[in-house]
Image: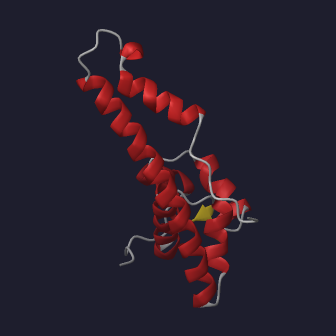
Amino acid sequence: MKSSTADLSIGEVAQRFGLATHVLRHWESMGLLAPARATASRRRYGSDDIYRVAVILRAKEAGFGLEDIRELFDARDPAARTGLLRRHRTELAARIAAAQTSLELIDCALDCDHEDIVSCPHFQAAVTARINPPSAPNALT
């Protein structure tokens, strides 16, 4: 639901979201924001602009880059938007899986009974697996 807050300055919007004002200007230069201009060309952010800033921040938290966010905003076809979301979901799932593997290694190290983690067989196996990852099946054979 969109906020009813309207007519904020760039400084007020930046403060509300914990951003530097140059970030909002950059997003504007990329076409992600288009605040109204008031006297002396000062930016004024309405409720739609505030909502859009929140969408940009949520998308960034989900790992979207600014170009992808612009593509989402610019997509007029729901199928194009869905395709971008599916592609990003696949990439995000891979990053989550890698982070989960890293977390498991850290948890193993913290629970390890060895005096030095480097001498732990589990740690050594994890490092060896990183050096020699299982080969992916060759698509040509």
**Which quarter of the picture shows residue 111?**
top left
Furthest-front residue in view?
A: 141
Residue 140: x %, y % from top left:
76, 65
Q: What residue is rendered at 62% in x and 62% in y?
A: 43
Q: What residue is rendered at 62% in x and 54% in y?
A: 136
Residue 9: x %, y % from top left:
53, 58
Furthest-top residue in view?
A: 115
Closer to the camera, 40 or 68? 68
**Which quarter of the picture shows residue 125?**
top left
Residue 10: x %, y % from top left:
56, 56
Closer to the camera, 95 or 65? 95
Does residue 111 appear to the left or right of 126 in the view shown? left
Q: What residue is rendered at 55% in x and 35% in y?
A: 130
Closer to the camera, 75 or 15? 75
Q: Relative to 94, say whether 115 is above or below.
A: above
Does residue 17 appear to the left or right of 115 in the view shown? right
